[in-house]
Amino acid sequence: RDYRSEDREDLGVSDFTAAMEVLMGVGAVATWMGLNKGSEFRSHLDTHLQVLPYPLHSVGEETSLRFPLELICDGALRDGVESLRIFDFKHCFRSLHHNDLPEDRRRQATALGQAASKAYEEAKATSKTGCCALAFTVNWLIFVPLAPPEVGSALELAWRELPPLPPLALTGVFVAPALSRGFPETVGLQVGSRSGKLVSNRAVEEGIPEGTPEYEAASREVRIAAQILEKPIELLRQWVEA
């Protein structure tokens, strides 16, 4: 799905309606990542809207949860809030319940598709870039605005090494690339001891001033703390719009 061209293929009512028809039939969550900026790191398949059936975990049949953050989403719906307490970064949570519609229309794919499309457009209006990670069910929609770095920048090197997680992470299922420990972790030191960040570069960590001969090369030496894989919220937050 080409979201980068002038006539970019953004999600519309027909996309949401088609997804709702599937979601209502199998019980699932739909996800999408829309990127109209930054360098591309995904396969062609991953640029499309995807529907993944429940359960979204490997805990086993002893749990009744369909996805890890189900209770948190249910609580947000019950409380009528527009954010999830577990996410401490910019995002939108929207209920897709339409109490102003007759009961027989509330659960129709057309009505749900229109509700999801409206919620998406409203959430997208709060974004500066138009890039996002998106997840939705027949009950709710989560929108997280993303801020891809400029192509060719030093920060883009970190984007390529540790790109945004697949939007399924918004339900609590995290799929991240493998990371090996690099310098300075290989000598027992921590990444971020100077900057406080888990994704940084040598110029920042060694305090090399901008404008010095060594700065340009040092700023392009990415340093990522391996421990970031143990901190899922940090992983999610990394490329979220401020």
Image (cartoon, rainbow, N blue to C red):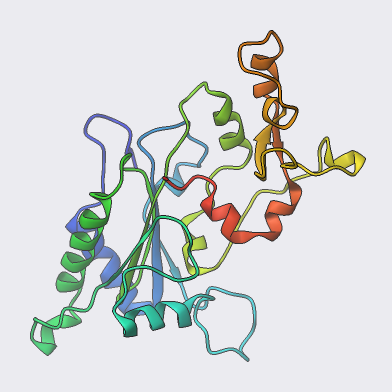
Coordinates of residue 120 in the picture (x, y in percent): 25, 58
In the image, taking residue 144 as reference, residue 62 lies left or right, namely: right
Q: Quadrant of the C terminus?
A: top left
Q: Quadrant of the N terminus?
A: top left
Q: Residue at x 70, y 21 (%)?
A: 208
Foreground: 9 or 146? 146
Coordinates of residue 27 in the picture (x, y in percent): 39, 79
In the image, taking residue 68 as reference, residue 223 lies left or right, namely: right
Coordinates of residue 119 in the picture (x, y in percent): 23, 62
**Image quarter of residue 108:** bottom left
**Image quarter of residue 135:** bottom left
* Total numbered badges shown on the rendered structure: 0
Q: Residue at x 51, y 54 (%)?
A: 166
**Residue most extreme to the top:** 213
Coordinates of residue 236 in the picture (x, y in percent): 53, 54
Asked if 218 appears above or below 190 in the picture, the reply is above
Q: Residue at x 65, y 41 (%)?
A: 199
**Image quarter of residue 74:** bottom left
Q: Residue at x 66, y 59 (%)?
A: 231
Asked if 109 appears above or below 48 in the picture, the reply is below
In the image, taking residue 5 as reference, residue 222 lies left or right, namely: right
